[in-house]
Image (tube, grey):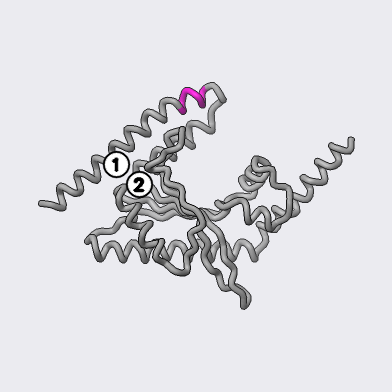
Amino acid sequence: MEKINEQIREERVMEQNLQLLTQDTFQMKSRCAIRLLTAKLKIADAELALKLGRNVILNIYSRIKSLDSIRDKCKKKGITADYAQVIEEINDIIGIRAVCAFEDDIYRLLDVLSSHRDLRILKKKDYIRNPKSSGYRSFHLIVEVPVYFQEEVCWIRAEIQLRTTAMDFWAGVDHELRYKKGRNEAVLIGEELKEYSQVVAKLDQKMVELRRRIEEI
């Protein structure tokens, strides 16, 4: 009985902490961080366009994780402590995704972002050169940007995903099919999708080779 009561208390505490994420202050700071990061990506794209004579970013998407998704991730990570721990340990509450035309442009974009002094890069994960076991490919950055709010500077954390159109298509199909089916079906779908991820990787490589040949003409 004591364990049940303790579990109930922990769930109530977590729910109270999570509700802070829905408050106007947090939401406003998050939206400001998204605007700052979007602007940085556009500036980096413009800088590269001057050098290359073409844009490298095709689309930019953003989102603030839903409360249900945050709740699920807290349970998965075993987070039941205070609001500060949620913000510290869940890095992708704020997410930005930049979709590039070519794979090598992702690394060009990364170099430019790394030169920005007011962008703290906390972690890099290269799932392009080192794909996940599922076949997922993308470059992930965990960053912090300064948001000036109510006479103080708040460094807001976010995840940036850099990927090609082909990678983005594969990831979308993977999410749509794998997580909407039962366990047995998900295994079969996952095996086939992993094969297709290798096709996507070859396509990205061929597109870079084609672009380089065109540039040499």
Q: Position of residue 164 (x, y in %)?
A: 35, 46
Mark 2 falls on what kind of element? Answer: strand
- Asked if labels 2 and 1 touch by Cβ distance under 8 angstroms, the answer is yes
Kindly identify the amino acid type of the residue bearing the numbered disc 1.
Asp
Mark 1 falls on what kind of element? Answer: helix
Given residues 157 and 39, the one toward you in this image is 157
Residue ID at (89%, 38%): 2
Q: Main secondary structure of the magenta part?
A: helix
Residue annotated with mark 1: 204
Residue annotated with mark 2: 164
Given residues 165 and 163, the one toward you in this image is 163
Kindly identify the amino acid type of the residue bearing the numbered disc 2.
Thr
Residue ID at (80%, 41%): 7
Indicate the quadrant where residue 172 lies: top left
Instruction: Examine the rendered structure and indicate whether residue 14 appears above or below residue 189.
Output: below
Residue 121 numbered mark, or none: none
Magenta stretch, residue numbers = 185-190
Q: Earlier in the sequence, mark 1 or mark 2?
A: 2
Q: Where is residue 41 in the image (x, y as percent from the top left)?
A: 40, 61
Q: Quadrant of the N terminus?
A: top right
What is the CA distance from the residue labelled 1 to the residue labelled 2? 8 Å
Instruction: Examine the rendered structure and indicate whether residue 194 appears above or below residue 109.
Output: above
Q: Where is residue 193 in the image (x, y as percent from the top left)?
A: 41, 30
Q: How crowded is mark 2: few (under 14 residues within 10 Å), some or many (20 or more)?
A: many
Residue ID at (62%, 78%): 151
